[in-house]
Amino acid sequence: MSNPSADLRALRGRHVVLGVSGGIAAYKAIDVCRRLVAAGAHVAPVMTEDALRFVGALTFSALASEPARTSLFDDRGAEADPIPHTRLGQAADLVLVAPATAKLLGKYAAGISDDLLTATLLATRASVLVAPAMHTEMWEHPAVQENLATLRGRGVHVVGPAQGRLAGGDVGAGRLAEPEEIVGAAASVLARDGDLAGVRVLVTAGGTREPVDPVRFLGNRSSGKMGHALADAASRRGAAVTLVTTAQRESDPHVDVVLVETAEEMHDAVITRFVDCDVVVMAAAVADFRPKATAPEKLKKADGVPEIVLEPTPDILASLGTRKAHQLLVGFAAETEHAREHAATKLAAKRVDLMVANDVSEPDAGFEVDTNRVALLDARGGVEELPLLTKIALADVILDRIREAIDTDEGG
């Protein structure tokens, strides 16, 4: 991500933990610190022991909003903070690491917290932005790329690196992004984190289960990962979120979770809450059919093969399309062939504003995996093909388009 011309007003009054790890580019973090403070941010520097080999803590203490911290422990006696990483993590609106070395990225991805900076990264719920910097050979190593992919999948933002002159006179990928670009990226992250404040969002997730008897059900392979990622991301960005889900997964504590099982239950839960919503994202894989009758007792093999007569379930998305007034309606089309064509037909027929189409037959973009590859279709005829993304990253892209649509409606 890069946005050197971002509006820096998002930094004003925000608490930024500036982590500095031990690379030659650590000297550039001084300028990053200066720019953050100039933009109105409260900057708390945290330096690793390796960083101190390249630049002094006194420099950051003089420029930042509070003295630089370098250790989980200090010698201030009774005044010492016994849990500085927790205090720093809780106070932060953003943790920015510049430079982020291969060592730092590896420890963060593995959950190793053997110094103040990595402990703070694990102890925060704030957004995290890392600016990698290392030699080209290290940057291109599969381990580094896998660690970065892991962090991106957890919602960590990345700026850079750039191509250019490196230590020792070499030229290639791995150069730290310029301070202006890093600060602009920090402003963009903070601006997006609150951009859905005041918006009421309802998300559905998981696959419904339609009972055949007390033991068996008709269902599908949906894990609920996409819907839960959307709910968590919307909450992080300031929305008031209700999640109607069949999947008992851990969610952001600020999300109001409503557990359901069948399509009928999901229909009722969504319809009763629809009037109070601004945005509805139907990410759930709702069964199209259910048994017309549910056996009161377990069906026995000895009684022979049962005849199960199916009937249609309520079409929740279509019902919302007929009811919507001010609401923005987002649907999902999980297909196994001609995904875009089928999604376009559903978008028009069900009065949907944005349709997310994906081919669930693809091994890296279907159910029960952490990634997805989709096309976004809007009611104005626009189509946007997205590359393979983690579902966490895709959630933010979808919410970006929702924010844009809200802004367009308000402006027009």
Image: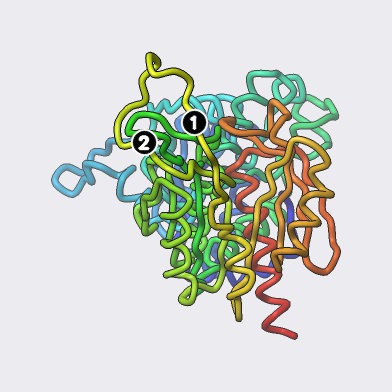
Q: Residue furthest front?
A: 303
Q: Residue furthest top?
A: 302
Name the residue at 83% across, 29% down: 172
Q: How is the image coloured?
A: rainbow
Relative to residue 30, is residue 273 depicted above or below? below
Label 1 packing within 10 angstroms: few (<14), some (14-19), many (20+): many
Q: Is residue 62 left or right of residue 367?
A: left
Q: Is residue 356 left or right of residue 257?
A: right
Q: Secondary structure at mark 2?
A: loop
x and y, in percent, of residue 63 in the image: 51, 58
Q: Is residue 60 visible?
A: no
Relative to residue 216, is residue 346 depicted above or below? below
Q: Is residue 350 visible?
A: yes
Q: Is residue 223 left or right of residue 321?
A: left
Image mark count: 2
Label 2 packing within 10 angstroms: few (<14), some (14-19), many (20+): some
Name the residue at 69% across, 64% down: 350
The residue at which mark 1 appears reads as 108
Q: Nearer the viewer, mark 2 or mark 1?
A: 2
Q: Quadrant of the C terminus?
A: bottom right
Name the residue at 65% across, 57% down: 331
x and y, in percent, of residue 124 in the image: 39, 46
The residue at which mark 2 appears reads as 295
Q: Nearer the viewer, residue 273 or 404?
A: 273
x and y, in percent, of residue 162 in the image: 78, 40
> Residue type at mark 1?
Tyr
> Residue type at mark 2?
Ala
- Quarter of the image for residue 85 reads top left
Q: Say whether disc 2 or disc 1 marks the residue closer to the N-terminus.
A: 1
Q: Secondary structure at mark 1?
A: helix
Q: Residue furthest left?
A: 78
